Every structure is written in structure tokens, then in C-alpha cells.
Image (tube, rainbow, N blue to C red):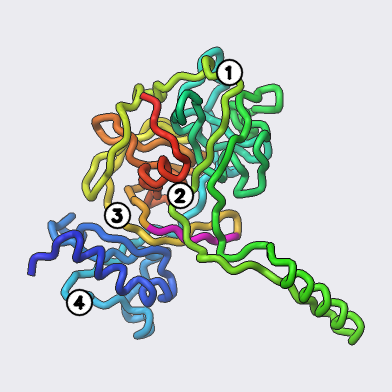
Amino acid sequence: MIVDLDRAISIKQQNLRHLMTRSNVVGVGVGYKETSDGITNDLAVVVNVARKVPVAQLTESDKVPRNLNGVKTDVVETGRFLAGQVTAQAQSTKDRWRPIIPPGVSMGHIDITAGTFGCLVRRGDEIFILSNNHVLANVNNAQPGDAIIQPGRYDGGSLTDQVATLAEFIPIDFGGDSPSCGIATSIENLLNIAAKVLGSSHRMMAYQTSPGENLVDAALARPQDPNQFTSEIFRIGAPKGAAKATLGTNVQKTGRTTDHTSGRITQIDVTTSVDYGGRVATFTGQLMAGGMSEGGDSGSAVLDEDKNVVGLLFAGSPQATLMNPIQPVLELLNVEIVT
């Protein structure tokens, strides 16, 4: 039976919950099935695992069926996905760019190590820098007006290298937050007073439940001097606009750590978990390419061969790269690409 893309996505969604609960699974997407002979033309529900384990070592509940409602499955070892600030082990060759700063170079919030300046975007007549929340807003911990420096702190940047301020960001939802309800806070306080009086060493904490799912890891910074920035991405050139990527789209990016690299979209509609320094967030509707990035490349604009921006790189592993499709990024921030 020939399976079309809509059916494959539908079957993936129907089976997503029980696939994600299997041990070792870090994400599920839709892609072309790979065999020892290479990539086939068969669409499959692709189950991404931290590490491939021999079938004989798996429990029945952890085994992935060979097909789901007539759609083939594939198991791919991607490793665990990490949100990609640079770590202390990474080697840095990125410079302080003056007088003109191009996208694709080291940048970040004053309190993070370093990430990448993705591209310029526009809302009306105002120009902004586009990158990730965890690059410009320190994983929800920053405030509008905070200093953005180029290069990032790990590359020698300091407050004297401030080139922008944080404008706004889409919060990353980790599935719970501090309570905003006065009733819940009052009950929490009363219960803790009672626990103390009764001699208990335990305490109660109210928290606000939330869907715990994310579409984007994105933020905007406001340049101190817009004339100091160019739209021409280092080693790529100016983007022509925005476009939608699909399976097999050839893509490229310039990032702070691995410079200019290219790859191919191998999975779409990916639901996956991403580790932010010990806190895990779930993302849905993502794009996946091969291993074309390392820590510090987060925030890079990902373009197709025609120089249309198709995604915003935000996480990866040695085997794979994750990116937000650019459409929800632009829609949620109410901006357009500067060409």
C-alpha cells in the first residue's frame, strides 16, 4: 500500500503517546525509512532513540512495532538532544565583529556562554535580531532591556561589547510554573504552617499546570544601532525570504561553532524532548536534519538552497540537528525576514 505524507503524519500522531513512553525514546517524527542499502522511498514513522539496543535486550513493552496501521516504522539513533549553548569543552574561533555585524556569528545574553545571531527580522519599521530564547533570554530568566553582547561571554565578550538589548521572547514551557492564583498560594502557606507546627520536615509547593508543549525556542533583541547590522548572513548572503521545508529539502546554516555547514531534512512533524541543563521541555512539529551543528550554533538561521529561511536551529546531538519551522517563529513574534 502506498502511504502518503498526510496519512503517515496522522498515524504518527495517533501512536505518539505510547511510543514516547518507551524507555530510550527521545522523539518521534516522519521520514523516509533507511535500510542497510540506504534511504528508501517508503514513508515511515521514525522513532528516535538515545542509543540503539539489540532487540533481544528489550522488554516487550519497549519494542517498536514493525508497522503501525499499515505505516512502516524505523528506529534511528540520534542521541539525546541538548539545547545548544557552547559548553566549556567546545573550541571557539569566533571574533568580535565591528563596525558591521553579520548574522551567523557569536552573540548572547550577558549571562550565558555564547550562541548565534540568527538573522534580522522586521516588524513595521523596526529591526530586530532573531535568535533563541536560551541564547537571548537565558531560558526565561532574563528581562526586557537586558544586555546582549557580541561576541558571547565565552568568546571574550563583556558588557563593553553590548550591541543590543533583549526585546521579547516566547517563554519555554517546562510543564509547570510558579502559581499566579492567590487562593493556591494562600493554601500553600497555611499547609506549610500546619506542617511546621506538627513537626514535619516536609513542605508543600503549589504550581501552575500547563500544557508542557512548545512550538518554538525564539527571542528578539533590539539593536542599539540598527546601522551596525547587516542582513547578509556570513558565508551565505542575504536571505530572500521565508519558505516551508519538507522531507529531503537541502539546508545550510552559518553558526558560531561549526561555521557554514549543510544537511538535509530527514524528519518532519517531530515531537521530541530537549534537555536545557537538566530541565526537559517537549517540542512538537519540529524539523530534523543530520548532524550539522554543535553547542553554540543555537540561534542559527537555517536556509534552503535558494536562500530562503526555513528554520531556526535550537538543539542537537552528534547525530542530528533540531530546528523550529520558521513559520510559527515569525507568526508568534509577529515579524518578517529582512532580505
Q: Is residue 276 left or right of residue 200?
A: left
Which numbered tag is attached to residue 38? none
Q: First in sequence, mark 2 or 4: give its number.
A: 4
Mark 4, residue position: 69
Of badges 1 and 3, the one in the foreground is 1
Which residue occupies 56% across, 61% down?
174
As drawn, the label of residue 216 is 2
Instruction: Give the alpha-carbon distance from disc 1 to disc 2, as whole Å.
Output: 27 Å
> Residue under circle 1?
225
Callouts 2 and 3 close, C-beta under 8 Å: no
Residue type, label 1: Asp
Q: What percent of the width, then of the height, locates residue 163?
A: 61, 23
Badge 3 element:
strand
In the image, 185: left or right of 37? right
Q: What amino acid is found at the position of numbered circle 4 in the picture? A: Asn
Question: Which quadrant: the C terminus?
Answer: top left
Q: Quadrant of residue 113?
A: top right
- Label 4 packing within 10 angstroms: few (<14), some (14-19), many (20+): few
Q: Which residue sits at x=64%, y=40%?
A: 112
Instruction: Name the quadrant containing residue 259.
Output: top left
Check disc 3 and report the residue beneath it.
268
Residue 256 shows in this picture: no
